Amino acid sequence: MSRAAFDIVGIGASTLDILTAVENFPTKREVHEARAVKMEGGGPVATALAAAAKLGAACQMLDELGDDAIGLAIQADFQKYGVDTSGLHFLTGSSSAVASLMVNRAGDRAIYFQRGGTEALSPEARAGILSRIPHAKVLHINGRHMDILDEAIRAARAAGAAISFDGGADRYREETRRLAEQADICIVARDFAEKYTGLTDCAEMVRALFTKHTKIAGVTDGARGSYLMERGGDVIRQRAYPVEHVIDTTGCGDSYHGAFLYAYTHGRSAAEAARLAAAVAAMNTRALGGRSALPTLQEVEAFLKAANTRSM
């Protein structure tokens, strides 16, 4: 790994999430009282960095936001979790991205989003992002800002940084294949893996994810756990940890990635990283939203100790 100022830098979408807990989704014009409403930062890479930073990793988010009140709220939420925001560029007169999420009592989600005015990076944002990549141990991406990612990957390789790719559910596109193929750490959702490999068995999909660059590959499968493999090793299965009262699964996959990368940058094996990641993802279901229940390292270690005691 490179000598770096940051364990993880991320390129991705930074949104403001407005979450509303409801009994049931509306089917017509209706008025109901919400069970809870919450506003916090969101986005797959962004939430992964929030999770890793809360565990103790040095993280920096690279993105462009509008200079509106929403952009300032997004920045403040990053800072709440300890994510460095000096790599954020604010585009004058532009709007920031917002996602409205309804979560029913069964845990299903309906999402409506507005992209904001920074879909295409300004020249200033581009230059700023590329200048910061050499200062990281890991570059974490998921396909957002595709027009800069090939150059970002080259910059990371030149600096000796590892490339981590998150292939989320319902996010497979042909153009994202090359990101998965170039990643040192390629952990994707089952839906993505099935479309990418054409296979249905998780262990087989993990093996099929390996390219000449891959050091660690994995497939996450929700409540059924995850499958990980280090180059030259065997596929290991990590069970999902049960939680007595699941409130919301928003951000579980993102927090899994963040916790895994925290462990990776702190010298833990893939098996150890998978255990930590599974625990963080489970703990993150205990509150509405993708970040509210993110644990500290001490909290997740206590959770794992209690889980191990119960299984004895």
Image (cartoon, grey):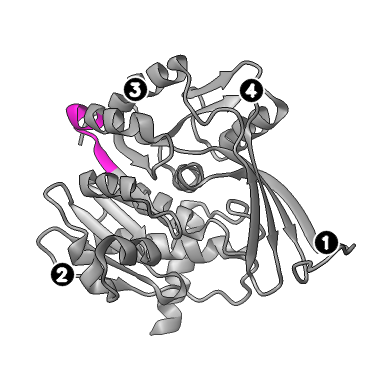
Q: For mark 3, what is the residue?
A: 130
Picture quarter with the C terminus? bottom left
Q: Is 242 situated above or below 110?
A: below
Neighbourhood count class around disc 3 (C-alpha, 10 Å): few under 14, some 14–19, many 20 upward: some
Q: Amino acid at mark 2?
A: Asp
Residue 201: quadrant of the picture: bottom left
Picture quarter with the N terminus? top left
Task: Give the mark toward the camera: 2 or 4.
Answer: 4
Q: Position of residue 82 (x, y in %)?
A: 52, 36
Task: Give the mark toward the camera: 2 or 3.
Answer: 3
Neighbourhood count class around disc 4 (C-alpha, 10 Å): few under 14, some 14–19, many 20 upward: some
Closer to the camera in the image, 274 or 207 = 207
Q: For mark 4, what is the residue?
A: 94
Q: Position of residue 53 (x, y in %)?
A: 47, 42
Numbered disc 2: secondary structure: loop
Q: For mark 2, what is the residue?
A: 234
Q: Position of residue 7 (x, y in %)?
A: 34, 37
Tag 4 or tag 1, which sits nearer the N-term?
A: 1
In 3D space, how far apart are the residues under numbered discs 1 and 3 (Cα atoms)? Answer: 43 Å
Q: Position of residue 212 (x, y in %)?
A: 11, 49
Residue 6 visible: no
Q: For mark 1, what is the residue?
A: 34
Numbered disc 1: secondary structure: loop
Q: Amino acid at mark 3?
A: Leu
In 3D space, how far apart are the residues under numbered discs 2 and 1 (Cα atoms)? Answer: 47 Å
- Range shown magenta: 156-163
